[in-house]
Amino acid sequence: MAFSGSFILAITALHILPDIYERSGHNHIVGLFIILGILLQIVLEFFTQGIEHGHHHHHDHVLSLSKGAVVGLYLHSILESLPLGVQWILDEGNLLFWGVVFHHLPIGIILYMILKSKGLKRNKILLYLALFAMSSPAGALAGYYIPAFQKIFVYLLALVAGIFMHISTTIIFESSHNHRFNMMKLVTIALASGLAFAMVEFLH
C-alpha cells in the first residue's frame, strides 16, 4: 500500500498536475476541481469504508463489506478511469494508466481478503472481483466513446488528481503503526517515487 500510494502521489506531482495547468492555459479554476476531487473522495469513503486506501487492512475489527461499500468502490474505480479513455484518443495515458494499475492491485487483494473473511462462496467472490476488474475499463470506455467527457477532459483530470492526492497521502500516513518513523516505509516511498520519476522521463 505504501508503494502504491507513493507512486500515485509522485505521478500526480510530476506529471498530472503540470499537465492539467498546461492544458488549461494555467487557469486557476482547475484548482477548484482538484479540491472538489479531494472532497468527492471523502464523500465516497463514507460508502467504501476506506477500502481504496487499505483502511480495512489496519482495522480488522471492521472487516465488513456492505452493498454501499461495493457500489462506492466501483464508482471510485470508474471515475478514476474516465480520463484514460480521452487520453487514448489523444494517444496518451501511459502514466495515468500505470497509476491506476498500481493503485487498484492492492485494492483487489484487500477486496478478496474481505470477501473471503465473510465466508462467501468462491463463485460469488469471483463475481465481485470480476465486476471490480471491469469497472476501470468501463470508465475508460465511457471516456473514449462519450464526447461530453472529452470536452471536460482537463476538469476530469483535475478531479482525479484530487482523488489521488487524498488517497495517496492517507495511504502513506496509515501504512505504519501509530504513524511512527519507519525506515522500510521511507525506502519504499523513495523507490516508488524514483520509479515514477523514471517513467515520467522515459515516457516523455
Image: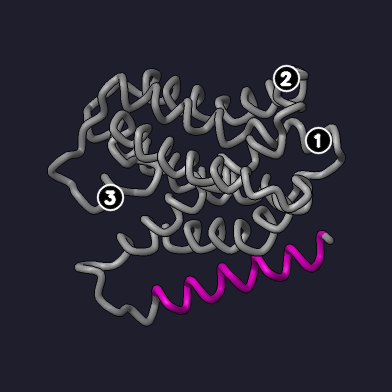
From the image, state whether disc 3 or disc 1 is nearer to you: 1
Q: Which residue is mark 1?
A: 88
Quadrant housing residue 134? top right
Q: Residue 74: which disc?
A: none
Give the camera-side residue of 105 and 55: 55
Q: Quadrant of the C terminus?
A: bottom right
Give the farthest residue toward the front: 28
From the image, state whether disc 2 or disc 3 is nearer to you: 2
Give the camera-side residue of 183 and 122: 183
From the image, state whether disc 2 or disc 1 is nearer to you: 2
For residue 102: magenta? no
Q: Is residue 107 left or right of residue 136?
A: left
Magenta-drawn segment: 185-203
Which residue lies at the image location 72% right of the left edge and 34% below the top edge?
153
Q: What amino acid is labelled 2 in the image?
A: Ala
Q: Residue 57: which disc?
A: 3
